[in-house]
Amino acid sequence: MTAVVRPAPALRSLPVLTAATAALGVAALAALGAAGHGGFASDLVGAVALATAAVVTALAALRLSRSGHRAAGRLAAGLAASLLAYLALAVGAVASVAAGHPSAGPAVAAWNSAWIPPLALLQLTASAAVRTGVAVPRTHRLVGLTLGAATLVNALLTTATEPFAGVPTIAAESWRTALAPAGAAVTLLAAAALFLLPVTLWRAALGSHHAVRARLGVAAAATTAAPLTVAFCLLLAVARTPGDVEPSLGSVAFLVALSGAAIFAAACAVTAARGATGPRRVGTVVRGVGLAAAALLVVGVGTLVAAPGSSLGPTSVALVVSALTVAVGGGAWAGTGRLAALLTAAPTTPATAPATAPVTPRGGAEGTTGGGAAGTTNDIGPAAPAGPAVDAAGPMPVGGLTAREREVLAALAEGASNAGIAAQLVVSERTVDAHLRAIFVKLDLTPGGDTNRRVRAARIWLEHARQPR
């Protein structure tokens, strides 16, 4: 069961403070919009979307803190604050432009860069929700530093030619960029950084088993929402030219997409942290991400083939888009269904696994590398035996294990692969491999026998956990 922790008083009041601040921001933008200022920047749809996302993520921060995931709770609180900051910067930018104040240029530049921090924080929140180690992962540092640098560079190097005078955020030609090569390099690094956590978590999930696999899969799906949001932004630029989509409509749509991604990531973080990873919920999460990616692909290709300069006629365009929708949509539906089933598959290992030929991965430790979880060397599945443990006749020999070795063994028994253990405990896979070697030695588990050493170690831990304290 997930422990219930009493959150700090400041965090308990966070949802109320967030809702009050968000309401003030929406009211201010509504007043500026009614006075004819701001255009899409003061559009109520985008403002309400940001306000709603801020409140939802603040509630998620409270729930994460109560479930004992304080790091994830703090990051979710930061996500809520970044969304409120985006809303507040919109108010400041519109008001300063309307008043003709000298700070209008810097205010608009700051507002134009405020969409980047929420992308980083929604990824970090979901990733932290499945981690039990107290250290900050290297991947978290890389994502935070890279996207922080991208925010600063974007704010310093780009300025609008005429702030809010028909200048939408997706109209790249309406912005002046100083030191363009440097800005482009930082942008590319930031885009690459957004794929770091999804790749890491998907790898850890697919190499693990059962409940661990499902939790890691939900977190991986949540982090995937960030690069999909950026892809949506790029699609809006394509849709404007050559697609002739109204720029202000596209900019509001981006605000809604960013808000939706933040809400999705916060909900996934709470789901993963609480272990509420039933087949239906995991299927909804995975299918949502897969179908969103498929929709972006279909709309992007459809926009290109339907562009005014295209040589295809209306009938040909309709046929191409229809065929693409069926192929991509059907493939995404089937593929995400299989992925969700894989993530939530129950263990199928029998009580006594058959003997397997010894496998010696790098370093010579049997079954301690690659995707192997608490199963045999050919990665049959997690160790969840119905029968007695290997040495159930006497006390379980786990007293000689260190605290970290116990954590590694507990994660192994849950079904985590080496990558999954490393992701949860915030250590390297090489460190996990070393801990497993030490565990095997201390538990007197030699290579060979009827079952793999990972299976036998997991059985010992499970039997130890069943004993009355």
Image (cartoon, rainbow, N blue to C red):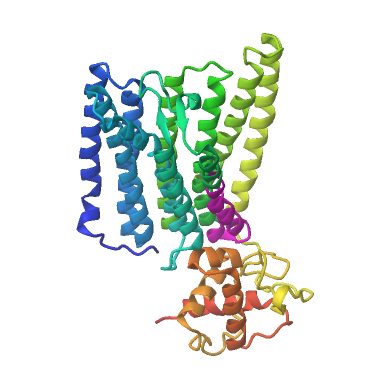
The magenta span reads 191-213
Q: Position of residue 134 (x, y in %)?
A: 41, 68
Is 367 part of what is drawn in magenta?
A: no
Residue 417 visible within the image: no
Residue sitting at x 75%, y 75%: 360
Q: Position of residue 263 (x, y in %)?
A: 40, 41
Residue 408 visible within the image: yes
Is 197 part of what is drawn in magenta?
A: yes
Looking at this view, name the residue that lies furthest to the right. Answer: 357
Q: Position of residue 245 (x, y in %)?
A: 51, 17
Residue sitting at x 70%, y 72%: 353
Figure quadrant of residue 201: bottom right
Q: Vertical placement of 77 versus 229: above or below? A: below
Q: Is residue 294 left or right of residue 376?
A: left
Q: Nearer the viewer, residue 177 or 441?
A: 177
Figure quadrant of residue 392: bottom right
Q: Nearer the viewer, residue 139 or 280?
A: 139
**Number of numbered discs visible in the structure rendering:** 0
Q: Vertical placement of 259 versus 347: above or below? A: above
Residue sitting at x 29%, y 63%: 5
Quadrant holding the C terminus? bottom left
